[in-house]
Amino acid sequence: MQYFFAIIAGLIQGVAEFIPVSSSGHLIIFHDMFRFNLPDNVLFDVTLHLGTALALIIVLYKDILKVIRGFFSSLANRNLAQNYNQRLAWLVIIGTIPAGILGYLFDRLIEKNLHNSPIAPLIVATMLIGVAVLFFIAEKYAKQNKTLAEMNKKEAFILGCAQATALIPGTSRSGITIIAGLWKNLKRSDAARFSFLLSVPAILGAGLVSAKDISDWHALPYKILAVGFLAAAISGYFSVKYLLRYFSKHTLRPFAWYRIILGLIIVIWVIFR
């Protein structure tokens, strides 16, 4: 049964990591509802996140290679960024800084105190509904007339700060970053692409921090972790490919309604369980 639950959790992670509905929030509810617990639930969830990071790398490998080449070629220039790929590389680096610092300082603290808290489902529900409201506001008032080529360093830093708030379960890394991009007038598809690029170092960094805290590598349930990792990677691959097309033509509103409905269901479930 644990392998079955590991597959389901991987599928949840792979889909919800990129669809702006909060993968961490869904996993908290999944663990709580089905009593699916391992010696270290946080490590298991981080493993699932690494599966989605692999999916991102596979789908966006051309963009990632351009960013890497842009970074190294920019080092030869005095102004660091003379073309689009060089500028994008530095925008990703700048956007990664706030999430990296705050994630390193507070990630484990939040996971220990919120993810395993008795009120964790209510926190998830609150953030699901609250961010959904921001979806509606951003879609109604944001101009959405800029591309990534027009983004500046200050805007990249703001998007990185927004991504850092996804440490709170129920927020959604992709959702909150896309909202910030919309408020800076980025087109939805460009905001989504930049959000996905920022996710790669953020997820890999969280994986390294979690690996540092492992005291007994021999006690890890490697087979269960591998099953969850593969399920997250495969479902994440198709999720990213779909969303990159979806956001070029469609709004965030369907996801906002989903978040509100799920948030209300969670509140009712907590009250009557």
Image: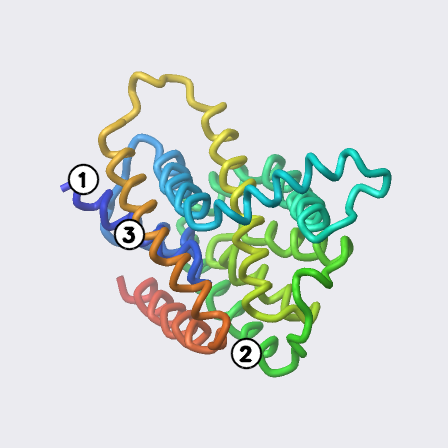
Q: Which residue is mark 1?
A: 2
- Callout 3: SS: helix
Up/down of 207 relative to 182, above or below: above
Question: Where does the N terminus fall, quadrant-wise?
Answer: top left
Q: Which residue is mark 2?
A: 136
Measured in 3D between alpha carbons, the distance from the residue under mark 2 to the one under mark 1, in whole angstroms, is 38 Å
How many numbered dots are placed on residues in this image? Answer: 3
Picture residue at 50% right of the left edge, 41% below the top: 203
Q: Amino acid at mark 1?
A: Gln
Q: Amino acid at mark 3?
A: Leu
Q: Which mark is residue 252?
A: none
Q: Which residue is mark 3?
A: 11
Specify whether 217 is left or right of 227: right
Residue 66: horizontal and vertical position, in percent? Answer: 59, 45
Residue 76: horizontal and vertical position, in percent? Answer: 78, 34
Specify whether 88 is left or right of 51: right
Q: Nearer the viewer, mark 1 or mark 3?
A: 3
- Callout 2: SS: helix
Report which quarter residue 104 is drawn in: top right
Residue 194: horizontal and vertical position, in percent? Answer: 59, 56
